[in-house]
Amino acid sequence: MKLLGMVAAAVAALALAACSPGDKGETKDGRTTIRFATDWKAQAEQGGFYQAMATGEYARRGLDVTIMQGGPGVNVPQLIASGAVELGMGSNSFIVLNLAQEKVPVKAVSAFMQKDPQVLIAHPDQGLNSLADLKGRPILLSDASTTAFWVWLRAKYGYTDEQVRKYTFNAAPFLADKRVVQQGYLTSEPYTIEKTAGLKPQVFLLADEGFPGYAAMVLASDSLIAKNPDAVRAFNEASAAGWRSYLFGDPAAGDALIIKDNPEMTPDILEQARAKMRAYAIVGEPIGAMTDERWKAFFEVAASQGVYAKDLDYKAAYSLQLLPATK
């Protein structure tokens, strides 16, 4: 199904709610209106954006930013392509290359997670020392993951589709069988498993074993990039400052906005997520950066597994012209 054809009721409702007098691009005080759609409910994994808004980084750069949290059924690229929002989050590099494949006029303009936080989670004391040791074990994966990072695991480690078991975002099957492995996010599922089951799982971060994908990317439409590149660059610069402050300064202001949007978040959940992002250098330096080399490496792995045609113009998926300035 073509990406632009995926029109769901949730998307239509959010698009309608997004309409405002600021749609013409400027507020009464001359600031540029930016509606930024996140890829999930408010959480620490979006903390830099919330921090930038809370501390005035966007306002100081002439932007009037509204963060619109995502959730189940929300299609961020669709919102951008339809004009319901100006910018949005791209969760992983596959989403961005899918846009190029479908010729959707939306591309990545920055990446605020230099490492995709995707992990595989195993039981401790199983003699597992690397991702290579998981070959042959049953692995719980969501449907989306089987056409995403799973293709890299097959290519690099010789995993087979016979290992795949359906993951329904419930840890019970994992906890019931010590041989079972499940997918997760570095900053989420390992902590939940440890807190609720009293089990400290073994965690394998795909990025630390060579997975070249980015995460927490900012997506913009080709029309906005052409019409107002200064606003896109300003958003990237402010977001970089927000991420630096959120991870290495006082995160209280950003956390307050996150909890306001998503009361399910608690200080301990947010703090452990920040600690892991720091410990594993998930955001990294230079903050927000992307390179041709990384995109080329990612595309070549995916194309070698038949995910994309080898002649796909993958460079249409991103732009390096509006990245934040390096420190």
Image (spheres, helix red, strand yellow):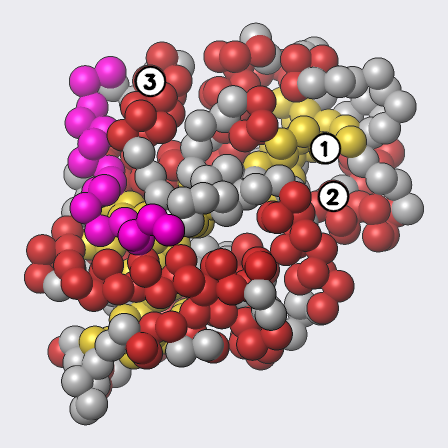
The amino acid on which the numbered mark 1 sits, given as a three-letter code, is Val
Identify whether 309 is placed above or below 81: above
**Marks 1/2: CA–CA distance:** 7 Å
Q: Amino acid at mark 3?
A: Glu
Which secondary structure, mark 1? strand
Q: Is residue 301 left or right of residue 131?
A: left
CB under 8 Å between discs 1 and 2: yes
Amino acid marked by disc 2:
Pro
Q: CA distance from mark 2 to mark 3?
A: 30 Å
Tell me residue 235's x, y (percent).
30, 63
Most extreme residue toward the bottom, as rendered? Answer: 28
Q: Residues within 10 Å of mark 2 (few under 14, many from 20)?
A: many
Identify the residue position indicated by label 2 in the image.
190
- The earlier-in-sequence mark between 2 and 3 is 2
Report whether 259 appears left or right of 31. Answer: right
Magenta region includes residue 123: no
Q: Nearer the viewer, residue 104 or 244?
A: 244
Q: Earlier in the sequence, mark 1 or mark 2?
A: 2
Q: Which residue is mark 3?
A: 300
Q: Up-down: is 124 above or below 116? A: above
Specify the principal SS of the magenta part.
loop
Q: Which residues are magenta?
A: 310-327
